[in-house]
Amino acid sequence: MAHQLTETNFQTEVIESSLPVLVDFWAEWCGPCKAIGPLIDQLSTELEGQAVVGKVNVDNARQLAVQYGVKSIPFLLFFKDGEVKDQIVGANVTKDQLKARLLALA
Protein backbone atom coordinates (compact mmCIF):
# COMPACT_ATOMS: atom_id res chain seq x y z
CA MET A 1 0.00 0.00 0.00
CA ALA A 2 1.09 3.53 -0.71
CA HIS A 3 2.03 5.68 2.29
CA GLN A 4 -0.84 7.82 3.56
CA LEU A 5 0.56 11.33 3.51
CA THR A 6 -0.83 14.09 5.70
CA GLU A 7 0.08 17.65 6.56
CA THR A 8 1.75 16.19 9.65
CA ASN A 9 4.10 13.67 7.97
CA PHE A 10 4.60 15.28 4.51
CA GLN A 11 7.81 17.08 5.52
CA THR A 12 9.44 13.90 6.83
CA GLU A 13 8.11 11.42 4.24
CA VAL A 14 8.46 13.57 1.10
CA ILE A 15 10.58 16.70 1.54
CA GLU A 16 13.30 15.05 3.65
CA SER A 17 13.33 11.72 1.76
CA SER A 18 16.67 10.62 0.31
CA LEU A 19 14.74 8.59 -2.30
CA PRO A 20 12.64 9.96 -5.16
CA VAL A 21 8.98 10.31 -4.17
CA LEU A 22 5.74 10.01 -6.15
CA VAL A 23 2.79 11.78 -4.50
CA ASP A 24 -0.75 11.07 -5.71
CA PHE A 25 -3.20 13.85 -4.79
CA TRP A 26 -6.64 12.20 -4.84
CA ALA A 27 -10.13 12.17 -3.29
CA GLU A 28 -12.65 9.51 -2.34
CA TRP A 29 -15.31 10.93 -4.72
CA CYS A 30 -13.00 11.06 -7.78
CA GLY A 31 -13.61 8.25 -10.31
CA PRO A 32 -10.29 8.58 -12.19
CA CYS A 33 -8.47 8.66 -8.83
CA LYS A 34 -10.04 5.33 -7.90
CA ALA A 35 -9.07 3.93 -11.30
CA ILE A 36 -5.39 4.82 -10.86
CA GLY A 37 -5.29 3.94 -7.14
CA PRO A 38 -4.38 0.25 -7.59
CA LEU A 39 -1.45 1.21 -9.88
CA ILE A 40 -0.13 3.56 -7.19
CA ASP A 41 -0.38 0.80 -4.56
CA GLN A 42 1.39 -1.72 -6.84
CA LEU A 43 4.20 0.75 -7.52
CA SER A 44 4.65 1.32 -3.80
CA THR A 45 5.24 -2.42 -3.29
CA GLU A 46 7.40 -2.91 -6.40
CA LEU A 47 9.68 0.05 -5.68
CA GLU A 48 10.16 -0.57 -1.95
CA GLY A 49 13.66 0.64 -1.07
CA GLN A 50 14.13 2.41 -4.44
CA ALA A 51 11.46 5.09 -4.17
CA VAL A 52 8.65 6.28 -1.93
CA VAL A 53 5.07 6.25 -3.21
CA GLY A 54 2.42 8.11 -1.25
CA LYS A 55 -1.12 9.46 -1.44
CA VAL A 56 -2.59 12.72 -0.21
CA ASN A 57 -6.36 12.87 0.25
CA VAL A 58 -7.07 16.46 -0.78
CA ASP A 59 -10.22 16.60 1.34
CA ASN A 60 -8.16 15.88 4.47
CA ALA A 61 -5.08 17.91 3.52
CA ARG A 62 -6.39 21.07 1.88
CA GLN A 63 -3.31 23.08 2.83
CA LEU A 64 -1.02 20.71 0.89
CA ALA A 65 -3.36 20.81 -2.12
CA VAL A 66 -3.24 24.62 -2.10
CA GLN A 67 0.52 24.72 -1.51
CA TYR A 68 1.19 22.54 -4.57
CA GLY A 69 -1.42 24.15 -6.81
CA VAL A 70 -3.66 21.13 -7.18
CA LYS A 71 -6.50 22.25 -9.48
CA SER A 72 -7.73 18.88 -10.76
CA ILE A 73 -7.20 15.33 -9.58
CA PRO A 74 -5.62 12.88 -9.83
CA PHE A 75 -2.54 15.10 -9.69
CA LEU A 76 0.78 13.27 -9.51
CA LEU A 77 3.93 15.04 -8.38
CA PHE A 78 7.45 13.62 -8.56
CA PHE A 79 9.85 14.88 -5.88
CA LYS A 80 13.63 14.58 -5.58
CA ASP A 81 15.63 16.24 -2.80
CA GLY A 82 12.49 18.01 -1.57
CA GLU A 83 11.72 19.67 -4.92
CA VAL A 84 9.03 18.98 -7.52
CA LYS A 85 10.79 17.62 -10.62
CA ASP A 86 7.85 16.41 -12.73
CA GLN A 87 4.07 16.17 -12.74
CA ILE A 88 1.18 14.36 -14.41
CA VAL A 89 -2.43 15.54 -14.32
CA GLY A 90 -5.13 12.92 -14.87
CA ALA A 91 -5.25 9.13 -14.89
CA ASN A 92 -4.23 8.61 -18.52
CA VAL A 93 -0.91 6.98 -17.64
CA THR A 94 0.41 3.42 -17.28
CA LYS A 95 2.22 1.90 -14.33
CA ASP A 96 5.35 1.47 -16.48
CA GLN A 97 5.30 5.18 -17.42
CA LEU A 98 5.04 6.17 -13.74
CA LYS A 99 7.79 3.74 -12.78
CA ALA A 100 10.13 5.03 -15.52
CA ARG A 101 9.60 8.68 -14.54
CA LEU A 102 10.14 7.94 -10.87
CA LEU A 103 13.27 5.83 -11.35
CA ALA A 104 14.73 8.45 -13.73
CA LEU A 105 15.04 10.67 -10.63
CA ALA A 106 16.85 8.05 -8.54
Image: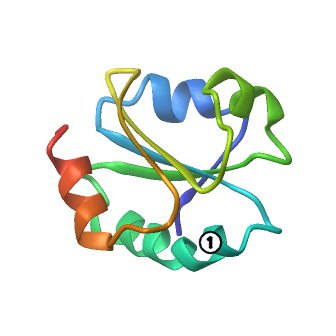
The reply, left or right, for residue 106 in relation to residue 91 is left
> Quarter of the image containing the C terminus?
top left
The reply, left or right, for residue 37 in relation to residue 101 is right
Q: Position of residue 7 (x, y in %)?
A: 73, 31
Neighbours of disc 1 within 10 Å: few (<14), some (14-19), many (20+): some
Q: Position of residue 22 (x, y in %)?
A: 41, 47
Q: Is residue 8 visible?
A: no
Local secondary structure at mark 1: helix
38 shown above or below 17: below
Q: Residue at label 1?
A: 32
Q: Residue at x 64, y 53 (%)?
A: 73
**Quarter of image, res 80:** top left
Q: Nearer the viewer, residue 38 or 35?
A: 35
Q: Residue at x 85, y 48 (%)?
A: 59
Q: Nearer the viewer, residue 10 or 88?
A: 88
Q: Residue at x 32, y 71 (%)?
A: 95
Q: Position of residue 62 (x, y in %)?
A: 82, 34
